[in-house]
Image: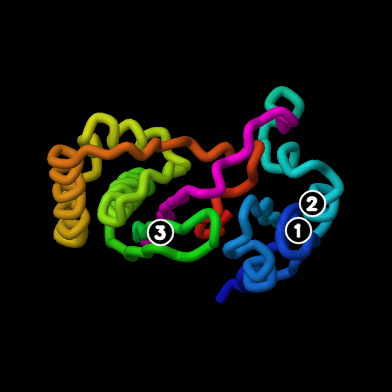
Amino acid sequence: MSKKKKKYYVVWNGRKKGIYGSWDECKKQIEGFNGAQYKSFENEKEAIESFAKPYAQSITKGGSKKKAAINPNAKPPTKRSIVVDAAWNTKTGDMEYQGFDFNTGKLLFKKGPFKDGTNNIGEFLAIVHALALLKKHGLDLPIYSDSRTAMSWVRKKKANTKLEKTENNQELFDLMERAEDWLQKNSYKNIILKWDTRNWGENPADFGRK
């Protein structure tokens, strides 16, 4: 049996900055922390070198041609908002999604895992879930998402997925149909915004599977 390769985790912005030798240690520093900045590396040398650099430069691939530059004039995210995210397991095909109150860090909902899903479907369902929750409580807070695709689906009130329906994901297709139906029958004042990872760090609703 092959031994699982050890990873190292760098935290640029969290409860305590540093380099950690396990995901559990890293998670303690960033879970529920607004604007957390972190990334995993394959070896300690790469982690040390990256920790010495700005976060934006370390998360950008492709060398100098694609170096990210943090905009010092970038407008910060609205604290009174909802942040949503989805995670898709490439090995199992399982998907799950969740939403947090950005201001308090409180988990508002978490659904899944669902079999045979996609990340964009999860993001779509998370946004609609947040919209329905906010409407129920009469709140017009903005919603932040990582997925431009899911945001587009919400605007069009249609999940334009190419995912094939299987026995395992029937529940997901039912949820998508219900979400589309909700969008058709309900209006809302909430603004749906793209989370600016480059300037703000990881989405606070991120599942941390980097």
- Residue highlighted by disc 3: 98
Q: Is residue 38 above or below residue 70?
A: below
How far apart in space, not on screen, are marks 2 and 3 (Cα)? 31 Å
Q: Is residue 91 shown in magenta? A: yes
- The amino acid marked with disc number 2 is Glu
What is the x, y in percent for residue 142? Answer: 43, 42
What is the x, y in percent for residue 207? Answer: 50, 59
Estimate how packed mark 1 is, as few (under 14), some (14 to 19) or many (20 or more) residues with alpha carbons within 10 Å. Answer: some
Residue drawn 66% across and 37% down? 199
Q: What is the magenta range?
A: 70-92
- The amino acid marked with disc number 1 is Asn
Q: Is residue 78 shown in magenta? A: yes
- Residue highlighted by disc 1: 43
- What secondary structure is the stretch in magenta mostly built from? loop
Sequence order check: which comes first, mark 2 or mark 3? 2
Estimate how packed mark 2 is, as few (under 14), some (14 to 19) or many (20 or more) residues with alpha carbons within 10 Å. Answer: some
Residue 46 numbered tag: 2
| Numbered disc 2: secondary structure | helix
| Numbered disc 3: secondary structure | strand
The answer to which image quadrant residue 169 occupies is bottom left
Q: Is residue 40 above or below residue 110?
A: above
Q: Are marks 2 and 3 in contact (CB under 8 Å)?
A: no
Task: Tell me: 124 left or right of 194.
Answer: left
